[in-house]
Amino acid sequence: MRPLFVLLFLGAPALAAEPMDVIALAIKAHGGKDALAKASLGEQKMIGIITQLGTEVAFTGEVLYALPDKYKMTLTLSVPGNKVVATQTVNGDKVKTVVDGKPQELTPAQKGERLQTTANQEISLLLALLDDKKYTLKAGPDAKVEDVDAAAVVVSRKGIADVTLLFDKTDGRLVRMTRQAIGPDDKPVAEETTLSDFKKFGDVLLPTQLVVTRAGKKFMTMTVKDVKWRDKIDDKTFAVDE
């Protein structure tokens, strides 16, 4: 056993921050509990570019959500010589995807990926992570996100894939999310979403630039143009036909 003075000289291993302390700091950084509670019903508008089969496709989009389990995203994709409108709706454990007015058959993996999207929305807004009956948190290894030193928290919940959140150690902002996504071939693929250019919408601080890679390759870039918080969203918005 090494003497105490030797350990002090060498430096003891750094202890990872307690996950709940990291989340508490992040909640404060993003606006606080009261502000984030109001963000449980919202509308977002965005533009971006998605890479499909090596081709970059521009899109505009709108997301409506009522957490914890209702989500609707509509994308208008500008494919060469045409526009394609794709909508995915989640209501509880029910999922519907429609492309140009035609309902799409989904594999179990594809359905799970859409349910994960709704969970990711709730996770990214942080407040629900305080519910230890719903979410389990554990510390992950510290990492660098661009030039930022980041603390990692691994988020687990029954029925979804684990999501690792990386937070700027200096101010608590959420700067990256990583997970195993489901690719077009129904196979898992490592996905990394880097968040930047933060802006306040009401009292909530959110990223307006998102860069997504899959298997280390660029998959999507997105700019959030507007965010509005809603008092109510009509349940018909999230209707999913059996």
Image (spheres, rainbow, N blue to C red):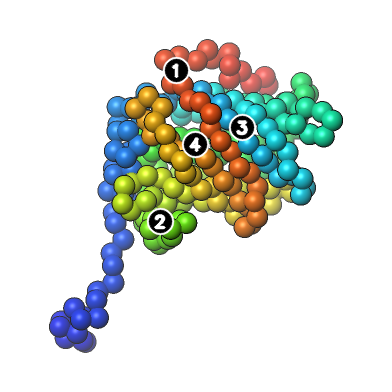
Q: Say which quadrant the C terminus sits in.
A: top right
Residue 94 - label: none
The alpha-carbon separation of the residues under discs 4 and 2 comes to 18 Å
Is label 1 or label 4 in front?
4
Looking at the rendered structure, the kind of residue marked 2 is Val
Q: Name the spot of residue 156 as percent of width and height, x first.
A: 45, 47
Q: Residues within 10 Å of mark 4 (few under 14, many from 20)?
A: some
Q: Residues within 10 Å of mark 2 (few under 14, many from 20)?
A: some
Residue closest to the eye, 26 or 114: 26
The alpha-carbon separation of the residues under discs 1 and 4 comes to 19 Å
Provide the residue designation for mark 2. 148
Provide the residue designation for mark 1. 230
**Mark 4 / mark 3, whichever is N-terminal:** 3
Provide the residue designation for mark 3. 47
Q: Which residue in the rendered view is the most extreme toward the right?
A: 81
Q: Are the residues flagged by discs 3 and 2 in contact, CB closer than 8 Å?
A: no
Looking at the rendered structure, the kind of residue marked 3 is Ile
